Image (tube, rainbow, N blue to C red):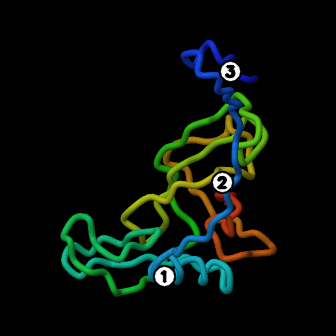
Amino acid sequence: MAVRSEDLGKTGTLAYPSRIKLPYVWYAGKAGSRFYQELRDHCRIYGTRCPDCSWVYVPPRETCPRCYRLLDEWVEVGNTGTLLTFTVTRYAVAGIQPRQVPFAIGIVRLDGASSGLVHLCGGADVSELRVGMRMQAVFRQKREGNYLDIEHFAPLRT
C-alpha cells in the first residue's frame, strides 16, 4: 500500500513499502566449515572440546565462552540425545516457516556433548514430545553442507 504524500510532511515524495530479497554468501568459519562438511559427507556430528573445562560444544566453537580458551580438539558426538526443552508453533506465518503447523523446535543435548543443539523436531505428532525423551538425528537424503542436512530430530523408538 502506497503512503500518501501528506503523511510525509507534504514533500511530494511517495513511498512504497516492499521487501527486497538480497542473496549473499557468508563464511561459516573454520569450526562451522568442518561441522557442515562432516554432516554433508559422512552424516557425523562433531563438536569441539575445551582443554580447561572439558565442555564439548555442538555446534562447534573456536573459543570457549566459559574459559576463553581456543578450541582445537574435535570430538565426534552421537547422533542421539536428550530433548531438553521444546516449543510448539501452532499458527502460520506465510513464507518464513520451515514446516506446516503445528511443528516443534527443541534443544537436544547429544550424547557426548555438553551444550544443546537447537533444531526441528519431527517424526512424531507434537503431542508426543516430552522433555527428557530420547531423540535421534534424521539426515536428509541429499545433503548440501548446511544446518538442515539434519532434517530434524525424531523420538528414538526402542
Q: CA distance from mark 2 to mark 1?
A: 21 Å
Q: Could you tell me the amino acid type at mark 1?
A: Glu
Give me the residue at 69% from left, 58% from top.
157
Q: Secondary structure at mark 1?
A: strand
Q: Nearer the viewer, mark 1 or mark 3?
A: 3
| Residue on which disc 1 sits | 76
Where does the N terminus fall, quadrant-wise? top right
Disc on res. 109: none
| Residue on which disc 2 sits | 155
User: Residue 90 lies in what quarter of the image?
Assistant: top right
Q: Nearer the viewer, mark 3 or mark 2?
A: 3
User: Residue 91 lies in what quarter of the image?
Assistant: top right
The percent position of residue 59, horizontal first and vertical second, equals 47, 68
Q: Secondary structure at mark 2?
A: strand
Q: Give above or below for 152 relative to 40.
A: above
Q: Give above or below for 158 relative to 121.
A: below
Q: CA distance from mark 1 to mark 3?
A: 55 Å
Q: Which of the two residues, 144 or 42, is positioned nearer the viewer here?
A: 144
Give me the residue at 46% from left, 78% from top.
29
User: Which of the marked residues, 1 or 3, is nearer the chain's N terminus?
Assistant: 3
Q: Secondary structure at mark 3?
A: loop
User: Which of the marked residues, 2 or 1, is nearer the chain's N terminus?
Assistant: 1
Q: Could you tell me the amino acid type at mark 3?
A: Val
Q: CA distance from mark 3 to mark 2?
A: 50 Å
| Residue on which disc 3 sits | 3
**In the current view of this chain or complex, which residue is farthest to the top?**
6
